[in-house]
Image: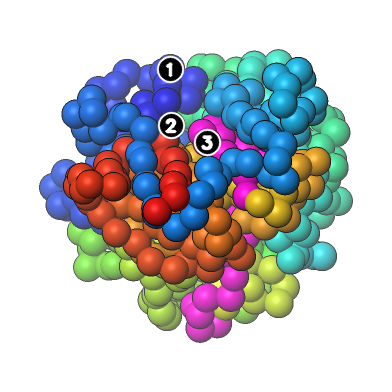
Amino acid sequence: MLLRPMANAQREVSSSLGGHPSGNRSRSQHFSPMWENHLSRSRAPVAKKRPKHVWAAILLTLSLSGITLAILNGATGLVGTAEDRSQVTVAGANSFAYSRQWGSYGGPITPNGVAVDSSGNLFIADAKNYAVYKLASDGSFVTTWGSQGTGPGQFKSPQGIARDPQGNVYVSDSVNNNIQKFTSSGGLITSWGSTGSGAGQFRTPLGLSVNASGFVYVVDQGNQRVQIFRNDGTYAGSFGGLGTTPGKFLSPYGVAVDSLGFVYVSDSASMSDNITKFTKTGGFVLTWGGLNSGGTLAAPTMMAVDNASNIYVSDNFWNNIQKFSTGSGSLISSWGTAGASPGQFNGPIGVAVDSQLNLYVGDSNNFRVQKLSASTGSYISSLTYPRLGLFSSPYDAALDGSGHIYVVDEGNNRVQMFSVTGTFLLAWGTTGEGTGQFNSPFGVAVDHGGNVYVTDYGNSRIEKFLPNGTFSRAWGPLELETDNSSIHTGSRLTVQTTST
């Protein structure tokens, strides 16, 4: 349970290729995100192994009354969870006969590429769940498509995502080495590409962008080039090539096209770390931004341009967004630091900007997309997935005296509350170490007052919440025994009250 298998996309590359770059590594340790950003993904830090006794049930003996919890109006309501099925099953009173189940998989996302349409709908390429998600401007779910595989409409590692003037959606797949074109609702239109170095072939396609005429620009990272296609997939040309001279690449990553047709390509290699501006046919215009040339970029990934001649670049090493002038390449502003709080980033990759100058950043290792002001960089909101009522490894459940079921949604670092019929009522918790946050919560129990206790395994503590999910207090790490109670920070949590 604690150490899940890596995503299939990760298995397809050697483990020697390294992990995801982060701001706490020295500059000398940094290397191209080519093998890091789009393949190495983990949900959250895994806690250290603990002695076997820690895995025992946690018993909180509270001398408050003469009842034992998990009894509802005299009828025993047994609640169980199925880790592999991501479902909750309820047995009838005084019986183990099957009654009902609800829920399906809805785990964290790894938002790599992001794109936004004129209505503010957001499109997210999710490498963790092999899918594309479409969310409304308020973050509500609209639709999703894709599954793991190599067939039509399937993905192994979706990376870049872009829209054309007709609203069609293009997605690059860095493992399947292809581009797929969909309608805005997910209907497959066409696909092209295969593994190789020939015209129209790819070795790790990442960023892509579509200009006003419908030409599709694709970063072919492993071949150190950008390829150009018509919107039906017909090959139209390429530019770049391996090298350090102007117009060449070492490890290209993102591409963006402005309203005038100029093309911008990021190079994430430590010897480059720059942005290069080209004409629409690949003619060299300008380069800027690399640390080696006195600039501020350390690992630029994907980019977006607005209609005011600004370009926004996500820097995967510094965990920030940098804003430049497209005309001169001069730095205008930057914002963001490493972390999980609003406005902070952990491995930012995808960037998109809408007509209202809202900026959307795929904060990949915080499993969210953040919405910021493109003018000031101030935080607006966080568009997160999964949807409420879905699960990623539901690990434990408890029933209170009012007929509410509390489910520890371990994979999503949250607790969800349902009615006994499976109707979603409430959820709380995010990934982190702060109050009310979790890192692999495993056990849950409810006392006679409706207070909810959760074992936060990764943070070695127990957290107490009011019935409405409001944080009350936390304690731990503990390992104590008294005459009438014993507490061990571990997995399953039980609250038992006995008569005094």
Image x and y of residue 165, in percent: 81, 54
- The residue positioned 67% from the left and 57% from the top of the image is 426
Res 389 seen here = no
Does the rendering let one see residue 148?
A: yes
**Label 1 or label 3, whichever comes before in sequence order:** 1
- The local crowd at label 2, few if under 14, some if 14 to 19, many if 20 or more residues have their Cα within 10 Å, is many
Q: Nearer the viewer, residue 2 or 245?
A: 2
Residue occupied by mark 1: 12
Q: Is residue 388 magenta?
A: yes
Q: Is residue 195 magenta?
A: no
Q: Earlier in the sequence, mark 1 or mark 2?
A: 1
The circle drawn on residue 396 is: 3
Kindly report which numbered mark, 1 or 3, lies closer to the viewer in this rendering.
3
Q: Who's the residue at 65% across and 76% down the image? A: 357
Q: Nearer the viewer, residue 169 or 392?
A: 392
Q: Which residues are magenta?
A: 375-400
Q: What is the three-letter code of the residue carrying label 2?
A: Leu
Mark 2 highlights which residue?
39
Q: Nearer the viewer, residue 490 or 83?
A: 490
Q: CA distance from mark 1 to mark 2?
A: 9 Å
Image point (64%, 18%), residue name: 149
The amino acid type found where label 3 is placed reads Asp
Q: Mark 2 falls on what kind of element?
A: loop
